[in-house]
Image: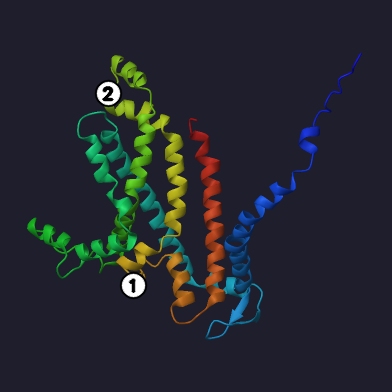
Amino acid sequence: MSVTERRKPGRLFKSKPPLWTVLALIPGLAVVIVFCYYPLARTVLLSVQGSDLFGRPTGLIGLENYREMFADSDFWATLLRTLIFTLGSVVGKIAVGLALAIPLAQRVRGTVFARSIVLIPMAVSVAVAGLAFRALMTPQYGLLDQVLAVFGAGPAGWLTDSKMAMVSVILVDVWTAIGFVTLLLITALDSIDESVNEAASLDGATALRKLRNITIPLITPTLFFVVVTQSIQAMREFAVINVVTGGGPARGTHTLVFDIYTKAFGGSADYGGASARGIILLLIIGLLSAVQFGVLEKKVNY
């Protein structure tokens, strides 16, 4: 009688991976190390080094760059502007995205064409969009001020008033991402079973009540994804601000990313100070994402 040898439990998972598997990982791992981990390590090193007028490292100075940064009142004002820009951008994208996605998710004639119109911002580069909006908001001949003049209102100061300039860059940032956000929300709305809304209608639920008690809870996974990704995007947004306002007027749109750019390439070549701000920005983004996962994810209905 032959006895069949039984495979020992866990043997399959304890065996070493084939050599070709290890070799296949090397190219991808090399790319990650060269383009992710090395720049991060280099930035950390620069943040604890001094630099001369040409940006060349002059030696280790410990946490001096961080101490100077935290002692600078302009840094805290810049951080506050960054948070205001992020909050306005994320709220605006969700509000406008929902306002567009809800009617576009209806299965009626013309919605396919309307969806293609909404997706146009995805095909326009940020630089082109920024220049176009800057032309619309220019005080001398901007179309927006001319429209306001028709209704008897004076110039809004889109680019000349510091508070309105922040509103302007938020509007442009919302426009550049609204196609992507709307597409995500339309996909989420299309996944809702129609029988749920039909049952609610039979029970006499109004459109607003269905939106609040049915639609929003069922698309919370997508909303959570939008909040997290767009918060990260807004915290590190540079192109819109650089093209539309250049950080002005009177530093009214001077965010943390723009501060990093001016520190490194604005003439002083302070790579140490710029690197310290970059590390702090990375930590803030990580902390913000952790808070969002810890607080908002509990309200997500998967």
Is there CB contact under 8 Å for labels 1 and 2?
no
Residue 42 at x, y = what percent?
61, 69
Which residue is depicted at the point 26% across and 34% down? 103
Q: Around disc 1, counting alpha carbons within 10 Å, would you say few (fewer than 14), some (14 to 19), or many (20 or more)?
A: few
Residue 150 at x, y = what percent?
7, 57
Left/right placement of residue 97 relative to residue 278 reads: left
Q: In the displayed structure, would residue 90 be above or below residue 268?
A: above
Left/right placement of residue 193 relative to residue 14 reads: left
Which residue is depicted at the point 59% across and 68% down? 43
- The alpha-carbon separation of the residues under discs 1 and 2 comes to 48 Å
Where residue 276 sits, quadrant-wise, is: bottom right
Where residue 6 sits, quadrant-wise, is: top right
Task: Name the element at disc 1.
Answer: loop
Which residue is depicted at the point 55% across and 70% down? 275
Residue identified by numbered label 2 = 206
Q: Around disc 2, counting alpha carbons within 10 Å, would you say few (fewer than 14), some (14 to 19), or many (20 or more)?
A: few
The type of residue carrying mark 1 is: Ala
Left/right placement of residue 258 relative to residue 1 reads: left
Task: Name the element at disc 2.
Answer: loop
Residue identified by numbered label 1 = 250
Point out the image quarter for the N terminus: top right
Residue 217 at x, y = what percent?
42, 30
Q: How many marks?
A: 2
The type of residue carrying mark 2 is: Thr
Residue 192 at x, y = what percent?
38, 26
